[in-house]
């Protein structure tokens, strides 16, 4: 009978190549995740070699651009106060009686003050404070530039009450459902029109439904 030590040495010798093959197979099967600025092409230039450190990367480039021209397009902030004055939005708001219509629906100054702690508890105020650049250059820009057309519609909806907002929410949601059901596609692209339009219609319908619910609760 073979000694026990000889058997163990034989088993170890047999198992070693198998283990090495297994480890090598797993290593070779793992996808390469390292990223390169030149997309891995040998003929492409390396950004780190031909770009000054002061503008290497998005953060450094924005900082340098702001030092050269504070009014540059990338870092420029939408001038809310100036555009509101130029478009005469305060005058149009007064002419439409928007504030008085909100008071008739129950939104008084006292109610507005009561909402602030609730918004802070929900994290809305912190979210606004941490995303000022995005909100000013994105949401505020669209809202202010479209205000001359939207203000009469909003004033009429507020005067009509929550039902007008519920109807608008149902209309937008129904339109998106119709686009899905009809199988309509975006021309020249081939994407589903329901999916593309839903990125705007569904959030808009949700916002309108929430506003309608909020107006309905103000009188309670």
Image (cartoon, rainbow, N blue to C red):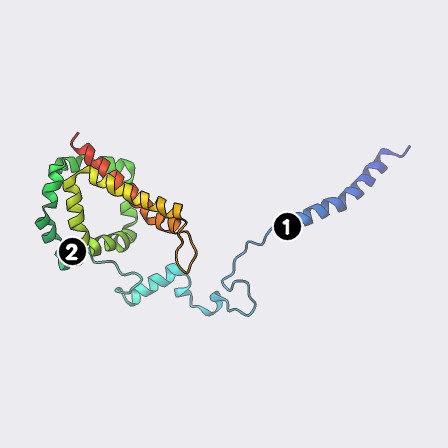
Identified at 14% across, 37% down, the residue is 105
The residue carrying mark 2 is 84
Corner quadrant of residue 18 = top right
Identified at 30% across, 47% down, the residue is 130
> In the rendered view, does 169 fall on the left or right side of 86?
right
The residue carrying mark 1 is 29
Mark 2 is surrounded, within 10 Å at the Cα level, by few (under 14), some (14 to 19) or many (20 or more) other residues, namely some
- Please name whichever residue, 166 or 44, is drawn nearer the observer in this view of the structure: 166
> In the rendered view, does 18 fall on the left or right side of 179?
right
Give the mark count: 2
For the residue labelled by badge 1, is the local secondary structure a helix, a strand or a loop? helix
Where residue 156 sits in the image (x, y, percent)? Answer: 15, 45
Identified at 25% across, 42% down, the residue is 208
Residue 207 showing in the rendered view: no
Estimate the spatial distance between the alpha carbons at disc 1 and disc 2, rounded to whole Å: 60 Å
Q: Of all residues shown, which one is farthest toward the right?
A: 1
Residue 139 bears which disc, if any? none
């Amino acid at each position: 009978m073979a000694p026990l030590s000889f058997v163990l040495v034989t088993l170890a010798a047999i198992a070693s190549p198998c283990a090495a093959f297994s480890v090598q197979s797993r290593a070779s099967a793992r996808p390469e995740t390292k990223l390169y600025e030149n997309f891995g092409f040998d003929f492409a230039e390396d950004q780190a070699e031909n770009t000054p450190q002061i503008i290497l990367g998005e953060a450094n480039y924005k900082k340098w651009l702001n030092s050269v021209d504070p009014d540059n397009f990338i870092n420029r902030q939408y001038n809310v106060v100036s555009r509101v004055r130029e478009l005469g939005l305060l005058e149009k708001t007064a002419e439409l009686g928007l504030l008085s219509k909100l008071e008739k629906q129950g939104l008084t100054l006292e109610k507005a003050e009561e909402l602030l702690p609730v918004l802070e508890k929900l994290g809305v105020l912190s979210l606004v404070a941490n995303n000022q650049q995005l909100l000013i250059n994105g949401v505020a820009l669209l809202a202010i530039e479209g205000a001359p057309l939207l203000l009469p519609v909003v004033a009429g909806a507020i005067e009509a009450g929550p039902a007008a907002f519920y109807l608008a929410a149902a209309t937008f949601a129904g339109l998106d459902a119709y686009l899905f059901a009809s199988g309509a596609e975006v021309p020249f692209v081939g994407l589903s029109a329901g999916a593309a339009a839903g990125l705007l219609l569904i959030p808009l319908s949700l916002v309108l439904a929430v506003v309608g619910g909020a107006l309905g609760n103000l009188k309670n």
